[in-house]
Each structure stands twice: as C-alpha cells, then as structure tokens.
Amino acid sequence: MKKKKGWLLTILVVAAVGISIITGHSNSLKAASSLGKDTLTLITSPDYPPYEFYDTKGGDRQIVGFDIDIAKTLAEKLGFKLQIMESDFNGLIPALQANRADFVMAGMTPTPERQKNIDFSIIYYEAKDTIVAPKGSNLKQPQDLSGKKLGVQLGTIQEQNAQKIAKKVAGIQLKQLNRVPEVVQEIKSGRIDAAIIEDTVAKGFAQANPDLEFNVIPSEEASGSAIAFPKGSSLVEPFNKVLQQMKDDGTLNKLVAKWFSQNITTNSASSTPTKGGLNLDFTRILPDIPFILRGIPLTLLFTLLSVSLGLIWGTILSLLKILGIKPLTWVANAYTSVFRGTPLLLQLALVYYATPQLTGYDISALQAGVLTFTLNSGAYMSETIRGGIQAVDKGQSEAAMSMGVPYWLMMWDVILPQALKNILPALVNETIGLLKDSALVSTIGVVEILRSAQIVGANKYIYFEPLLFAGLIYYVLVMGMTLGASALERRLRESE
C-alpha cells in the first residue's frame, strides 16, 4: 500500500512539474505573441563599461556587459529573440520616440523629466555619484566644488544632479560633454577641475589613470538604473515581473558580482606609472587594433556610395540650373541653399530619426548616412559641375547642335566628359572631405573608424592612443586617394 502511495505521489509531482513547465512556456510565448513579433530590439550606448561595451579582443564586434546580460535573460524568459542596436547616449530617447527600438538599457535613471516622454521599469541597480578629480585635489563633498569648473556627460542623471548642486553651491561652472572619456580627458588637460561620474565607471577610470581620484558623494534622492520603453509600451509589466524574479532568485546579484567586482582594466593603463605630457603607451591598444581596422571597409563603402550617388544627383541639379527653365532653376537653387545653409549633423539627425515617423520605413543607420551625405554632397557638387560645364567652349555645343545632335546626347557625349575633366581636382577634394566627414555617422551608431577608436578608448579608459591610431588610418587613406587622383589626372592630360 505504501509502495502504491509512493508511486502515486511521484506521478503527481512529475505531473505538477510538467504542467508548470508547459504553463511557464506558454506564458512566455503569450508575451512574445502579444506584440505580434518574436524579436525585441534593444538600443544602447556601448561606451559605458561595465554596463555595456564592445568586447574588442581579437577584432570581435560583440556588445557585452551587465545590461546586456540582463537584457538577454529578460528576452529568453519572455520568449523573444534579442537584437542589439547602438547610438550615442543623447540619441537613445529620440530613438525610442521614433520607434526605432523596443527598449533602452544604458544605466539610465528614471527622472521625472524623462518620465514625461518615456516609461520605465522598476530600478534594477542602484549606483552612487562620485567626484572625480586630479589626485590630491581633496574634493570630497559638494561644498568643496565652490568656484570650480565641473564636467558632466550630456543627458545623464549626473548632469541633472550637478545642476542641483550648482544651485546650492555658489560659483560652480558646468561643462557638458558627449562622453565620459571626454569628461575625464578635460580633467587631465586642466580645463575643468572635477567631474560627476557614476561610482562603477569612476572606479575604472581611476584604476586606468593613477593621477586621478574619486570620492563618493551622498545622494539626495533615490536613483538607479532602469529600463526605458516608449510611452505606453505593453512590455513594462512583463519586464517588471521578470526583473522582480531575477531580484528574488539572486540572478541580479550574480550578474552584479560578475561585472562590478572584476577589474576590467587588466590590459589597460592600470599598471602604467604617471608620467608627464600625454603619457602615451600604444602597447595598451595592440590587442584592439584589429577591431579598429575593421572600421575601414565600412568607411570606404560609405564614402564610395556617397560620392557616386552625390555625383549623379549633383549632375542632375546642375543641368536643372543651366537648362534655362526658370521654375526648375529656382527649385534647384532653393535646394542647394537649404543643404548648404544648414549643418550636416542636423540633416543627418533629421533623416535618421524623422524618416520612420514620417514614412513608416525603418531606415538603417548606414542608409540614413548615405542618403544624407548624397543629398548634401549633391548640393555642393552641383555648383562645381555647373562651373565645369560652363567652362567648356560654347563653340562645341553650337557645333553639335548645328549637326542636329540631340541636347541630352550632346551633353552626355561632348560636354560632360570635358566638364568632369575640368573639375577632377575639385571632385577629389569633395571625396576627401566626405571620407573625413564620414566620422559624423558615428553619432547615429555606425561603427566606422573613429567610432571604433572611441569604443576602444572607452573600454581601456584611455583617450589619445586609439584616436591617434585612427588619425593615422585616415591619413593613409587620404594620401592613397590623393596619389590615385594625381595619377588619373596625369593620364587624362596625356590623352588630350
């Protein structure tokens, strides 16, 4: 009898476990199917170790970190696949508002100002602010910052906390910068006296820069990191449930121990003694050089596409200007004035963030960059090409027309080849300008040469070495392009 009862109990237990597994699985599928898609898109700013950063060893382009591990766990438990995108920190909220991503994880604090525009999960990690300053500055309390220049990262909770401190402590001058490495570099160059930086990040910079120190300052109100969602997102509730489960079962504590207790600057400057000058040591970036070099093909592809399409678009605009049809001339001139009269960075941000909202098409960062640079470059090239066409002797067009050659055939076979030969040096200058300006697309998350160097700098808590190496790459590419153009120009002259 006892044996039968034991078997019966065993069957009931197995059945209960099976039902719970099936129920849990169906719940996760329910969460996935409720959005009508099986993939969630996370957007982050991977220059903030140990929260999120690139694992650059061996040239890999994989974003890792504390937030990424949490995001993967959340996606797995809710039955989603996970896609990771990147952007500058100050472009994360606009990306959510433009529905370019489902959620943001970037050590973001749910402030009242942010909550007016986006929703937040519960706080999953609490951090503290610190004052980072040159060693021996003895800046330990907010009151010590009186009369000092104080640096902060633009758009962060540290910026808001610094503004609150500045209202209470007289004489503080704030300086906002885009990235924490730039803030730290401003301290080292003496342009600012100190900076407000989160404790986990400040610890890494202090280890990599022995001439810096940091002191934790008391928080006036509760703060911490939470997940950001578009306003009204249906993901908030299921994410909160899983986050609470991760808190209760110790998963979050394990991830905290994994990422915040390790010394991620093992290969950085932590063992490098402080010297005078720039304190350069290129051996610190040797393992990361393949990662930076992988930005070259993307930079060249971007430049090649932008120049080719810009040349075609510029030629069309220049023909509209010289056709003699006033409405077309007016439209072409107005277009040129708009694109020459507004900053390229502004045009890039509008194309990238406004396109999904206006058209519903989720334009990629590379597509947005190529489109913007094509439209902008076309405006400049149209003037160059127009000048080249008008420099061709009028007698040639008159001779072609007297022989009955159609206008477009005359332009294609007679005028444009000579015009392009005249403007070749100007086109080379435009191409070189596009190659260097391609660094602007890093602001919308394209990991080209400069962005790759900045990522390595952020990972290593250093500044100059990766940027100087990126500068060397740009110089070699520009010199190669210049030599190629000179050879082509000589060959064209020989054929005359």
Image (spheres, rainbow, N blue to C red):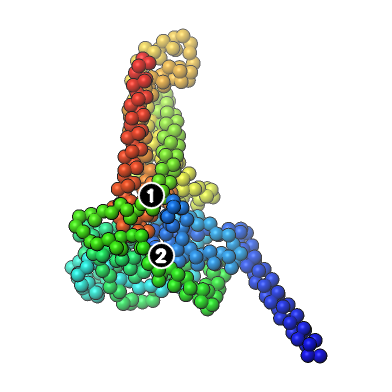
Within the image, what quadrant is residue 324 found in?
A: top left
Residue drawn where x is 55% and y is 73% of the image? 241
Within the image, what quadrant is residue 90 found in?
A: bottom left
Identify the mark at residue 16; answer none if there is no mark: none
Residue denoted by label 2: 50
**Which residue appears farthest toward the top when viewing the image?**
403
**Which residue appears farthest toward the bottom when viewing the image?**
1
- Residue 127, relative to residue 382: is it above or below? below
Residue drawn where x is 34% and y is 42% of the image? 473
Q: Nearer the viewer, residue 440 or 467?
A: 467
> Whole-Å distance between the Cαs marked 1 and 2?
21 Å
- The answer to whether any part of residue 117 appears in the image is no
**Mark 1 neighbour class, 10 Å CA radius: few under 14, some 14 to 19, many 20 or more:** many
**Mark 2 neighbour class, 10 Å CA radius: few under 14, some 14 to 19, many 20 or more:** many
Residue type for callout 1: Ile
Regarding mark 2 in the picture, which secondary structure is present there?
loop
Rendered location of residue 362, percent (x, y): 52, 50
Residue drawn where x is 56% and y is 64% of the image? 75
In this image, 102 relative to 457: left or right?
A: right
Rendered location of residue 32, percent (x, y): 61, 63
- Residue 284, relative to residue 34: is it above or below? above
Regarding mark 1 in the picture, which secondary structure is present there?
helix
- The answer to whether any part of residue 19 appears in the image is yes
Residue type for callout 2: Pro
In this image, 56 relative to 25: left or right?
A: left
Identify the mark at residue 289; answer none if there is no mark: 1
In this image, 363 relative to 205: left or right?
A: right
Within the image, what quadrant is residue 65 found in?
A: bottom left
